[in-house]
Image: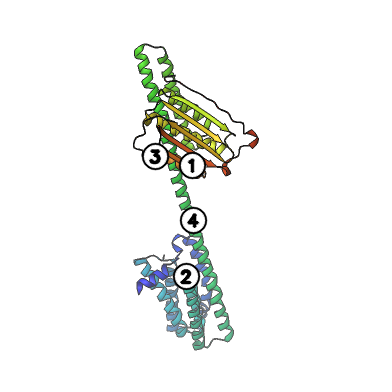
Amino acid sequence: MIGRLERVFTFGRTGGRGSRPRRLMGIAFGFMYLAYPVSAIVTGEVSGAEAVWQSVALGVFVVTYVVAVLTPGEHGERGRRAITLMALTTLMAVVFPLLFGSEWTALPIYVTVMLSMALPLRHALVAMAAMSLVVLVDCLVAGAEIGTVMMLLMQVWTLGILFASVRNTRLLVLQLEDAQREVARLAASDERLRIARDLHDLLGHSLSLIVLKSELAGRLAEQGAERAVHEIADIESVARQALVEVREAVTGYRRRGFAEELDGARAALAAAGLAVAARIAGTPLPDTLDGLFGWGVREAATNVVRHARATRCEITVTNDGTHATLEVTDNGVAGPYEPGSGLRGLAERVRAEGGTMEAGPSPGGFRLRIAVPAPHLAGPEDESAARDTGVHLGSGT
């Protein structure tokens, strides 16, 4: 029984996050309804032992009510304490008007406010109806005037509905704050994933190129070739560029496009001893696809250098007005294929643009293909002249 009551009373209890001084000010303002019993004691209308009993009863009611309102509705011991305090306050609001007279008939209003802030709306409406019945019985027993009865009944319902609305509004505010915190948490998580993905792609490509050029520089140095100095300078340049790209990726300002990534891929593949053919046909790529295809070329070139053991690589880009397509193929050894984090990250980028990605062994090697549909294209149709760069870089050049 206590467990069921606890679940009802703790549903939507919103006091735990509110400002306690502000709530105390609101409670103090509500004590205006106690002016009648206080006035009867102070003016001597009630005297002797009766005045003492009423003073004690009034003090107990005020303390119990304040503590009940300020006690957070939580499960466990504190939740049971809150229910006990509210039950005791309700009992006093029912009994005291019967014992002390019509000056005390406003006490059910305090119970109405308390329960309206603690209960869901349907339970709060039941509490308002119950307090209305208590007001009627207390007023009839105490011999209150009909005007007083009507005023108290009106205040029970108006204040009850008002504070039930305040409670619901506060609940919505707290839910909004929770939602905002969750959005911020997800945004931070997405940003961490973006940084991790970008760093993987950037460093994988740059470090592969540094390793290749270091090996080439070592071989040239053994032969006493002057070109070793040039390769070492290239290694320094690649390392510096990698540092710049890492900083840009972390701060979110990295904006390398397809043309730059294509140049970098050519350099990496050439350093690995592959012949490269790059062909571009159709209208220029829009900005969104320019960056996406740049990532695709970078990731494909890195995988070719690391895993393919190929001698030739072809990069083809087409934009025919209905689809833009990037295809990278090589003639390497097509062994067992398991996509790594780089390809998975690239697939996420492609899906975000509404496109599809295929990656896997093909006849004579390995193929990566990215296709994005027309709604994401923005190139002018009057620029549809095809062009073919036809770049061929021989082994070791």
Q: Which of marks 3 and 4 is nearer the N terminus?
A: 4
Disc 1 vs disc 3: which is toward the camera?
1
Residue receiving disc 2: 120
Disc 3 vs disc 2: which is toward the camera?
3
Give the residue type that dot 3 points to. Answer: Ser
Q: Label 1: state its secondary structure.
A: helix
Query: Marks 3/4: CA distance?
Result: 35 Å
Query: Marks 1/3: CA distance?
Result: 14 Å
Residue receiving disc 1: 350
Asked if the residue at tag 4 contacts the one at tag 1, i.e. Cβ–Cβ closer than 8 Å, the answer is no
Residue 20 seen from this side: yes
Q: Label 3: state its secondary structure.
A: helix
Query: Marks 1/4: CA distance?
Result: 33 Å
**Viewer-side residue, 33 vs 263:** 263
Residue receiving disc 4: 177
Residue at 40% across, 75% down:
87
Q: Label 2: state its secondary structure.
A: loop
Position above or below: 259 against 67: above
**Image coordinates for residue 73, horizontal then vertical, percent:** 41, 66
Asked if the residue at tag 2 contacts the one at tag 3, i.e. Cβ–Cβ closer than 8 Å, the answer is no
Q: Label 4: state its secondary structure.
A: helix
Label at residue 341: 3
**Image coordinates for residue 102, horizontal then vertical, percent:** 51, 84
Query: Marks 3/2: CA distance?
Result: 49 Å
